[in-house]
Amino acid sequence: MIGVRNPVVLCCALNLFAFLSVCSSDVSISVSPKTLLRSRDPVAIWWSGVSSPSKLDWVGIYSPANSSHDDFIGYVFLSSSPGWENGSGFISIPLINLRSSYRFRIFRWNESEVDVTRVDKDHNPLPGTEHLLVESEEIEFKPGRGPEQVHLALTGRAGEMRVMFVTSHGEESFVRYGLARTRKGLDQVAGTRVERYEKEHMCGAPANQSVGWRDPGYIHDGVMINLENKQRYFYQVGSNQEGWSNIYSFVSPDSNSNETIAFLLGDMGTFTPYTTFQRTQAESKSTIKWISRDLRAIGDRPAIISHVGDISYARGYAWLWDTFFTQIEPIASAAPYHVCVGNHEYDWPSQPWRPDWAANIYKQDGGGECGVPFSLRFNMPGNSSEPTGTAAPATRNLYYSFDMGPVHFVYMSTETNFLPGSNQYQFLEQDLEQVDRGKTPYVVFQGHRPMYTTSSGHKDGALRQKLVEHIEPLLLKNKVSLALWGHVHRYERFCPLNNFTCGSLEKNGKFWEAFPVHIVIGMGGQDWQPTWEPRPEHPTDPVFPQPVRSEFRAGQFGYARIVANMEKLRFSYVGNHDGKVHDSVEIMAPDPSVFDSTSHSLYHDL
């Protein structure tokens, strides 16, 4: 345990009358342990001697430890501790390894000092830092404990699995893997390449300012090769010099499989156990909990996880990326985690493609990141990229595809040029035309901003019109099975659609025209979206009526599952509030011999 006492003499000199009762007594703070081992390890903080405590007194969390008072990563009010009125208390906070030391500082903050014009992104007044009472000694993470933030991805090539992780040093690191958990069982080794990004790569505030920027560490990228089909592989990452990670495991894809299992979500974000400059997403913990349950339940069957944009909601506050990757590690280290870009990873006022009709759509939602953390912290199949027009490296991971079992997955970017003539449009057109529907009878198309939604009024209307005009014909021509979207933080399933019109039933009531079923799955954790009924504190928000084309919509958080074989694909929506299925639909496999028919797909609303 560490202790430090501070009589706050300077405070007394400057504020003799207003703060005499505080300054005349010593304030002490103690933290334990001094050295943490891994991310999410808790640190305990005790304090005492706070005279005439205010309910707004707060403890700030600082990393690096020498950060200026206003550049905290978060804070907790002392009044959250039982007995705080007596001037003493205790809190415990799990910390993320940010590759630099931490320090805690306690400040006096009175209601008379609250500045309602100086607020965070959640409209909370930022706490005052004028009256420092005490600060702790530094605490740090023990070096040599191995990398963290481990996550997998498919490469698009059979017999391979990509693994990425973060270190503080950038030294040569490896992946060792094999079919047994023992050290001897990890008998194969892969090297890694290393990348990082710098503050000057950011294109705006807060990402390029001291309040938001934190060193991102070194991002390592390795590929495990020569994997046997559908085997549980064990692996760990690191080096003998800098230490090894825990041992993780995954089930390798089966290139001959007739089954696909996928867990899908959008707009999840991450959670911090403290208040910070951005609103964080407590519900994201439940999403990960239930997906973890499902991964355990499927046992030794391969699966993927798909996140359709708005990933961490860091928006320029770098430590939230570290928090996000630490939070998803239990699932992302066990199954490949695939993403597409959202507005909160990318958008900035001078982005290269910003047509006149999108001037009020593409704004500064990326917090000055201009897609850089997204591009370097993930590595998706393919080689799509677009220049940023700034010092930042090109934006990557924009559009790509891969097969898994009987499903062909396609990802697009709604934030960069998708109009005819663009590189992205050409890719989507060629990719969809080349799908072998005998091998992969289902096509699941994914992007961030939805082509169809009933819950956001006229917002993004011009963009949705362009999607309907230019992208929907590709989906219809190539008989895409499902189109999944995020951005709207609710779940909504539509009938099979063509230009806002449902497919027609034939006489037996089962055969639908081969239109894609559009589903919005942005219910992963972010909670900004108003529900379809007015909230008590927002009585004037519009109520959006449910048209016939919208067959099911729900306001609960959750995620989706796909389980497909060569006969049918079943899509289900799972609610976080109970972990149960609340909506599902089945799409029957088309008959390749009649693939030019417009009435091939069986669609069951279950």
Image (cartoon, rainbow, N blue to C red):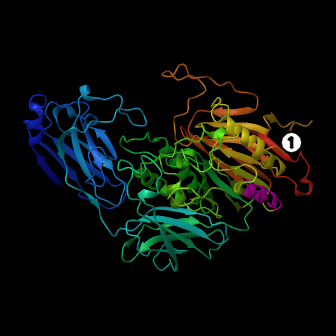
Location of the C terminus (image quadrant): top right
Q: Which residue corresponds to mark 1?
A: 513
| Location of residue 536 in the rendering, given as x and y in whole percent from the top left corner | 50, 21
For the stretch drawn in magenta, the main secondary structure is helix
Q: Residue furthest top?
A: 539
Height in image: 472 above or below 124? below
- Identify residue type, mark 1: Glu
Residue 596 shows up from this direction: yes
Height in image: 415 above or below 497? below
| Location of residue 431 in the rendering, given as x and y in whole percent from the top left corner | 76, 59
| Location of residue 532 in the rendering, given as x and y in whole percent from the top left corner | 61, 26
Location of the N terminus (image quadrant): bottom left
Q: Quadrant of residue 359?
A: top right
Query: Which region shows up in magenta?
Result: 425-438
Look at 65% across and 72% down and name the residue there.
159
Look at 26% across and 42% down and name the residue there.
59
Q: Quadrant of residue 239?
A: bottom left
Q: Decide if residue 432 is on the left or right side of residue 295.
A: right
Decide whether residue 267 is among the magenta residues: no
Secondary structure of residue under mark 1? loop
